[in-house]
Image (cartoon, grey):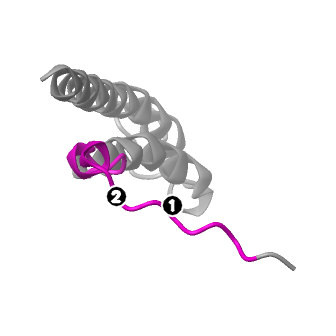
Amino acid sequence: MSEPPASAPPSADDARRKPVVTLPMVVAGVCLALPFGAMLWVDSYARLKPAFIGIPFFYWYQMLWVFISTALTTVAYVLVRRQERERKRGGRA
């Protein structure tokens, strides 16, 4: 059997590359995953009280998450776009 090829020594390009998984990308992932977790955990909102202006908790909680999800998706979008711009700017220099 043959030996696996030896890995090449790191080049200057490898040393300048930034990691793909950065803190802003992790925060963006959490922002996108949070609404799914909140909606899939049905036991947390499967009740009638407290009612809000006559609307049972079950309904207004879900409608509240529509707005929260929009805000979190916007935050994730801004973080990812900013990260992409930094990576492109770093590649040109």
Q: CA distance from mark 2 to mark 1?
A: 50 Å
Residue 47 sits in which quadrant?
bottom right
Identify the magenta region: 3-22
Image position of 1 with respect to 33: above or below? below
Image position of 64 with respect to 8: above or below? above
Q: Nearer the viewer, mark 2 or mark 1?
A: 2
Q: Decide if residue 54 is on the left or right side of residue 3.
A: left
* Residue 49 percent across, percent down from the top left: 45, 52
Q: Quadrant of the C terminus?
A: top left
Tally the marks. 2
As rendered, which of 49 and 5 lies closer to the eye? Answer: 5
Element type at mark 2: loop
Q: Residue at x 32, y 32 (%)?
A: 76
Q: Is residue 9 magenta?
A: yes
> Is residue 48 among the parts visible in the rendering?
no
* Residue 57 percent across, percent down from the top left: 46, 44
Q: Residue at x 53, y 44 (%)?
A: 58
As rendered, which of 90 and 29 lies closer to the eye? Answer: 90
> Is residue 56 among the parts visible in the rendering?
yes
In the rendered structure, are the residues bearing label 2 and label 1 in contact, judged by CB atoms less than 8 Å apart?
Answer: no
Q: Which residue, given by chain and number where applicable, does mark 1 sit on?
A: 44
Q: Amino acid at mark 1?
A: Ser
User: Taken as a whole, is the magenta stretch helix, strand or loop?
Assistant: loop
Q: Which residue, given by chain and number where applicable, does mark 2 sit on?
A: 10
